[in-house]
Image (tube, rainbow, N blue to C red):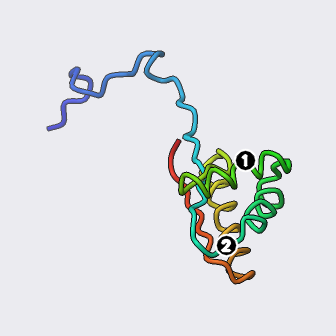
């Protein structure tokens, strides 16, 4: 027989445990290669990520010097969309530029 109400049910969470967590943010990372022109990368950063020209060139230089650079930080869905747009534009232009997303 079932023993409803015998105290064996689930405990209610207190209010502190019920607080909602902020959604994780994701970085869009562009990776260096030996073939994609820096001008193309800077242009793509301005077009897809809406970076002003000086910021786009700073990210481009970081990619070139450090092997990778962060184009922006977004919600997961937006980061994946922007990464996909970047990869698509690079392929359409004949460049092997690679973009990925990773948790912040």
Residue most extreme to the left: 1
Q: Quadrant of residue 73?
A: top right
Tell me: residue 99, above or below residue 62. Answer: below
Q: Nearer the viewer, residue 98 or 65?
A: 65
- Give the residue at x 82% y 46%: 54
Characterize the local packing of mark 1: few (<14), some (14-19) or many (20 or more) Cα atoms within 10 angstroms: few
Q: Residue at x 58, y 72 (%)?
A: 34
Q: Position of residue 32 (x, y in %)?
A: 57, 63
| For the residues bearing labels 1 and 2, Cβ distance under 8 angstroms | no
Per the image, label 2 sits on a secondary structure element best described as loop
Secondary structure, mark 1, is: helix
Q: Viewer-proximal residue, 2 or 34?
A: 34
Q: Position of residue 65 (x, y in %)?
A: 58, 53
Image height of 16 relative to 35, above or below: above
Which mark, residue 22? none
Q: Nearer the viewer, residue 4 or 16?
A: 16
Viewer-proximal residue among 83 and 43: 43
Q: CA distance from mark 1 to mark 2?
A: 16 Å
**Location of the N terminus (image quadrant):** top left
With respect to residue 102, does 99 lie above or below? below
Residue at screen point 69% across, 67% down: 86
Q: Is residue 41 left or right of residue 53?
A: left
Identify the residue at horizontal 83%, vertical 52% (top origin): 50
| Pointer 2 local density, CA inside 10 Å: few below 14, some 14–19, many at least 20 | some
Q: Indicate the position of residue 75 as horizontal and vertical percent values.
A: 63, 46
Viewed as shown, does residue 90 lie left or right of 21? right
Count of marks, rendered view: 2
Q: Quadrant of residue 87?
A: bottom right
* Residue 39 percent location from the top left of the image: 78, 65
- Residue 58: mark: 1
Q: Read off the residue under disc 2.
A: 36
Of the image marks 1 and 2, the number of the one nearer the N terminus: 2
């Amino acid at each position: 027989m079932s023993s409803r109400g015998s105290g064996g049910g689930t405990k209610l969470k207190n209010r502190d445990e019920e607080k909602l967590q902020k959604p994780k943010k994701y970085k869009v990372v562009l990776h260096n290669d030996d073939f994609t022109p820096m001008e193309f990368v800077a242009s793509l950063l301005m077009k897809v990520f809406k970076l002003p020209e000086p910021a786009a060139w700073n990210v481009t230089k970081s990619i070139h010097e450090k092997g990778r650079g962060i184009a922006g930080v977004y919600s997961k869905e937006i980061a994946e969309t922007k990464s996909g747009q970047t990869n698509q534009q690079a392929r359409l232009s004949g460049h092997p530029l690679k973009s990925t997303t990773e948790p912040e």
